[in-house]
Amino acid sequence: MGASRAQKLSGIQKQVLSLYRGFLRTACSKTPENQAHIESLVSAEFRKNAQSIDRKNFLHIEYLLRRGKKQLDQLKTVDSVRLSSSNIELSDNQKQ
């Protein structure tokens, strides 16, 4: 695949890819068990959204980007443990 044949990405596509890479990088800092869990959940969620959401539905895509960024920020905290499909599950000492 040559650079001249590659399709240029839009700004929103770059943001989605950046968010995806951010989740994968953050997963590397977790325990191997949690890392595998995070990677599989993130991959499944991104694939599901890529197939089910119209590419021209920018409002919904931007909403998912904002939600994903919040989840990523929470996941980056030292005490965060797991990522669920709908939100971040925090360790007991952060819930109090």
Image (tube, helix red, strand yellow):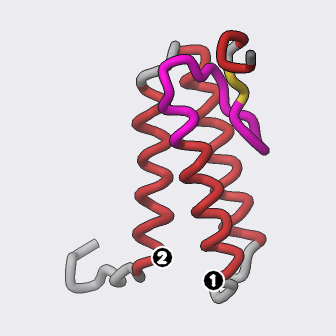
> Which numbered disc flags the more N-terminal residue, 1 or 2?
2
Q: Amino acid at mark 2?
A: Ile
Q: Secondary structure at mark 2?
A: helix
Corner quadrant of residue 83: top right
Q: Residue furthest front?
A: 96
Q: Which residue is mark 1?
A: 58
Q: Is residue 11 left or right of residue 82?
A: left
Quadrant containing the N terminus is bottom left
Residue, x 78% and y 44% (percent of image)? 86
Q: Residue furthest bottom?
A: 56
Q: Amino acid at mark 1?
A: Phe
Q: Position of residue 28 (x, y in %)?
A: 43, 26
Q: Which mark is residue 82?
A: none
Say if the magenta span includes residue 76: yes
Find out whether the residues at labels 1 and 2 contact each other: C-beta distance under 8 Å.
Answer: yes
- The residues colored magenta run 73-88
